[in-house]
Amino acid sequence: MSETKSIVQTLYTSLEEAVEELHRRRRKDEALCRTVAEFQRTHPPEFLDGEPRAMFARYVVTPGVEFTRLQAMCRRSGLRPLALKFLDDKFVARNRDKHMLGMLRFRSGNGSRKLRTVNFCRFEGKKLSKVQCLSGQSLPDFHHRLLEHAHPGALGDVVDFSAWFRASTRHDHYYLHWLSLFVTQGILFENFFLDDPEERRFMEERIWPSFTRALELFGVKPLIVRLFTPEEENTPICWQYPGELYPVARDLLNGSSKTEVLSRQHPQLEARDTGRYGQGIFAASDIKAGTFIHTLGGARISLDEFVARVRRGDERLDDALQIGKKTYLDLDEFSRLFNHSCAPSAGLRQANELFALRDIRPGEEITFDYSATVAPTVWRMECRCGSPQCRRVLGDIRSIPKAQLDQYRKAGALQRYMQALLPDILSGSYQIPAYERRALEKLEG
Ligand SMILES: [Zn+2]
């Protein structure tokens, strides 16, 4: 048996076997679960919430055929997907995965049809998060919007793990920490293309030594399932997009305004200039009180990761929505357009669901009260919403006048996590957590 063949046989597990084995380890092998937790102690993967996941990692998560395949595997395995993105890397055209982000190939009959999104020369070597499409929008945002269109809600299961990966790989074995995620916490869906010399070297020098080390350390294999069959591997299908996404991607790219894309998803909404504070979202038709408006989308990130992004200048402090004590959504381009008002027309319920607080007439702006989403902290923002009740300076939830907060509570316009914290906040026993103070001090420092 050739060496490659034996590597491949050891490396992959079949889907059925992997799922069974994952559940067995989690239910019956407490010692193994403890060993993994102990190994990850210095760099715990905070993006995991304890639920076993079908994991998938790419620089930018995009709805190519491989994503469709991941979703199918999730349905078969009963596992929820978790797509990990690594935006903290450079755009290099000769890297196949990165090239694919700039030159999309859509399935079309037996062939494919191309769509170029990026001027490769202009952005070679630049950070992925800074790369712009030909239309001027950011490349990751373009792919995320395409993803949201193809798989509504999928962005909620996308996490940037750059910070965790960078921190954990300062240690001896580069990919050992990475592979430790697939021992008891989930399954990795991946293909290693061993016919490609660069990929083969990556496998032989990085993955394989760490894989064998993981075997020694944990006594069992990390669970890796092939996304594509050996027959499909190295055929164009692995790098293509479903054909029906071509017109959507083309519209997104042709500088088609947000309004056009929007109008297909949300006939009752339109994005336009507010004339006072940049763009906003407006009702295009009557929206009755209590009606669902939009699920605010974006990648789930930790407070530390968010602070790191603000410090790098990638984000502004008000681009994130708090959805848990330590969890935030780095809002997508569209979701960021909903402005704050001290007399809002909409509210948030569940984690990130926007709904009408009152009847909204066509032409009225859809706004919500940012303070209602912010747990006690030192965050402040100046307000120029212009409503008679304007508070001028926005703080966290404690800055909302009591009568108004009561109205939000009665209307169900508080997120789940906030409802859970509220009794402590109102009684004054809620303490701003130490990690939050530390994170915010970093912002000032
Ligand atoms: Zn105001």
Image: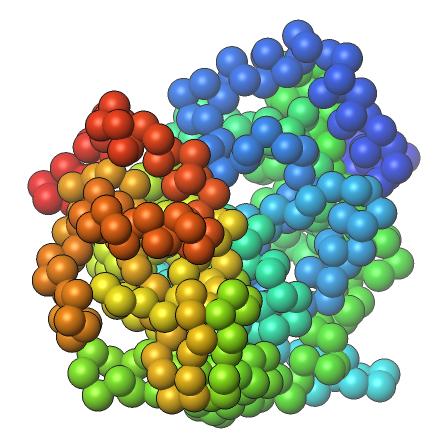
Identify whether 204 is placed above or below 33: below
Left or right: residue 386 compared with residue 48: left
- Residue 311 image point, x, y percent: 21, 51
The count of marks equals 0
Q: Nearer the viewer, residue 207 or 439?
A: 439
Q: Nearer the viewer, residue 351 or 174?
A: 351
Identify whether 170 is placed above or below 102: above
Look at the image and tell me in which quarter the N terminus lies. top right
Left or right: residue 313 compared with residue 445: right
**Residue 243 appearing in the image:** yes
User: Residue at image x 35%, y 36%?
Assistant: 422
- Residue 315 image point, x, y percent: 28, 59
- Residue 338 image point, x, y percent: 36, 71
**Residue 166 appearing in the image:** no
- Residue 12 image point, x, y percent: 79, 37
Identify whether 9 is placed above or below 406: above
Look at the image and tell me in which quarter the C terminus lies. top left
User: Residue at image x 78%, y 85%?
Assistant: 108
Q: Nearer the viewer, residue 355 or 4?
A: 355
Left or right: residue 293 compared with residue 132: right
